[in-house]
Amino acid sequence: MRSRYRAAPDPAGLLTEPFTIRELRHVHEAVAGHRLLPDTFRRSMLPGLAQTGETFSEGRGRPAELYRRISAG
């Protein structure tokens, strides 16, 4: 499972779409068993994600963009 998660955003579908990059990173960190660098993680996952055009706001700060997985096929 860890090797599948290194290469693709949420291949097991553990997250409900749409999701934020932060939520996706937290799932990947749980699978990997260690913390991942946010910027490096984002760059590696963006090719497999599509923006929904929507945002999510919780608390202070800029709203987070929402994404969905791009179908592999």
Image (cartoon, rainbow, N blue to C red):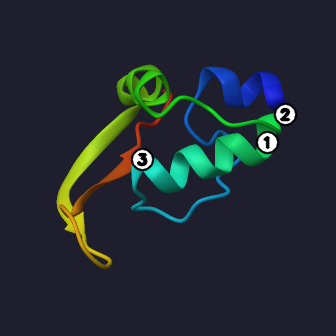
Q: Is disc 2 placed on a helix, strand or loop?
A: loop
Instruction: Out of 27 and 48, give the one closest to the viewer.
Output: 27
Residue 9, above or below 56:
above
Question: Residue 44 in the image: x percent, y percent?
Answer: 46, 20
Residue at 46% x, 51% y is 22
Q: Residue at x 39, y 62 (%)?
A: 18
The disc placed on residue 53 is none
In the picture, the quarter occupied by the N terminus is top right
Asked where in the image residue 37 lies, by quadrant, the reply is top right
Helix, strand or loop status at disc 1: helix
Marks 3 and 1 sit apart, C-alpha to C-alpha, by 15 Å
Residue under label 1: 31
Residue at the disc numbered 2: 1
Residue at mark 3: 21
Q: What amino acid is found at the position of numbered circle 3 in the picture?
A: Ile
Label 3 sits on a secondary structure element that is helix
Task: Name which of mark 3 and mark 1 comes first in the sequence.
Answer: 3
Image height check: is 19 above or below 73?
A: below
- Left or right? Give the position of 35 relative to 2: left
Q: Tag 1: Cα neighbours inside 10 Å, few (<14), some, or many (≥20)?
A: some
Residue 33 relative to residue 58: left or right: right
Look at 51% across and 56% down and name the residue there.
Answer: 23
32 sits left or right of 62 in the view: right
Mark 3 / mark 2, whichever is N-terminal:
2
